[in-house]
């Protein structure tokens, strides 16, 4: 890392701290042109230290996820809007499966005012958010705790989820491919998420637009397995066509 130019080292440090950096903000910060910043970002991406997205770059590559704390800082307003909109689709007096993710945690936050809600989850952070909500009963999966994000994964978690048939599921993913594939990084979490997909009557996928510009190596499922997609921006035409063909309702939540 010591061989990087000073500005690129500073950009990389910012990206690791914030999860994301934007071209215009960096150009202002370092008093250089946007073209210079784009060159810096491209070189950092060529070294696989950052991953380019529209208007900037994020930490992480196609095989390594952005850290949990950094993900919390990515598109927070969009995730909050998605969380509120998804929660509004879930009625009182029902059961819900909820998986790991910073966006699903925003859904958990927005559900704390519900009544008669049974939530089954492998997400320790969601339990922390909802445990004091008077109208919510929580059941947490057993299994291996993933230190990186408080997710509970492994065979025991899969077997636990398979005991239920919930009215709704809210799932998040790491990336959505242009062919409609739902992608993730950890095969242990993939197996839990697949169990959630199998054991819910209505599946709500929550994903901000950044998920469309990322990639991940493991196929979790396909958009055709989803009933409702809640996102923050209109989809690219090919993906919208896939959703329409699969009967997926598209809900746009405006930050």
Image: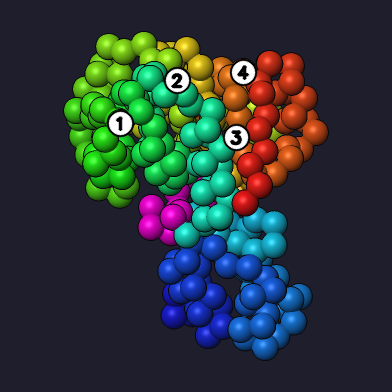
Q: CA distance from mark 2 to mark 1?
A: 17 Å
> Which label sits in the foreground, 3 or 4?
3
Task: Answer few, some or many: residues within 10 Å of disc 4's Cα (few below 14, many 20 plus, some between 14 and 19).
Answer: some
Classify 228 as above or below 213: above
Q: Residue at x 38, y 38 (%)?
A: 113
Q: Which mark is residue 135?
A: 1
Q: Which residues are magenta?
A: 61-72
Q: CA distance from mark 2 to mark 3?
A: 14 Å
Residue 35: quadrant of the picture: bottom right
Mark positioned earlier in the residue sequence (2 or 1): 1
Q: CA distance from mark 1 to mark 3?
A: 24 Å
Q: Which mark is residue 214?
A: none
Task: Answer few, some or many: residues within 10 Å of disc 1's Cα (few below 14, many 20 plus, some between 14 and 19).
Answer: some
Mark positioned earlier in the residue sequence (3 or 4): 4
Q: Residue at x 63, y 58 (%)?
A: 52
Q: Which residue is mark 2?
A: 168
Residue 85: quadrant of the picture: top right
* Dots 2, 3 in contact, CB < 8 A: no
Q: Which residue is mark 4?
A: 224
| Residue 45 can be seen, yes or no | no
Q: Position of residue 132 (x, y in %)?
A: 24, 41
């Amino acid at each position: 890392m010591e061989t990087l130019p000073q500005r690129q080292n500073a950009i990389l440090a910012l990206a690791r701290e914030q999860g994301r950096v934007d071209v215009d903000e960096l150009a202002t910060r370092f008093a250089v042109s946007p073209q210079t910043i784009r060159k810096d970002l491209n070189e950092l991406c060529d070294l696989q230290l950052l991953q380019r997205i529209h208007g900037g770059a994020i930490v992480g590559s196609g095989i390594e996820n952005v850290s949990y704390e950094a993900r919390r800082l990515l598109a927070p307003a969009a995730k909050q809007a998605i969380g509120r909109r998804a929660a509004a689709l879930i009625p009182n007096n029902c059961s819900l499966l909820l998986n790991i993710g910073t966006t699903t945690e925003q859904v958990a936050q927005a559900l704390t005012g519900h009544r008669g809600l049974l939530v089954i989850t492998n997400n320790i952070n969601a339990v922390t958010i909802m445990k004091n909500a008077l109208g919510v009963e929580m059941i947490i999966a057993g299994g291996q705790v993933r230190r990186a994000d408080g997710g509970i994964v492994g065979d025991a978690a899969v077997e636990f989820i398979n005991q239920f048939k919930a009215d709704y599921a809210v799932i998040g993913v790491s990336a959505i491919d242009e062919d409609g594939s739902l992608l993730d990084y950890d095969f242990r979490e993939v197996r839990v998420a697949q169990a959630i997909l199998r054991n819910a009557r209505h599946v709500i996928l929550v994903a901000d637009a950044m998920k469309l510009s990322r990639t991940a190596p493991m196929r979790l499922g396909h958009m055709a397995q989803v009933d409702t997609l809640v996102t923050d921006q209109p989809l690219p035409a090919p993906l919208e066509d896939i959703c329409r063909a699969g009967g997926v309702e598209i809900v746009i939540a405006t930050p």
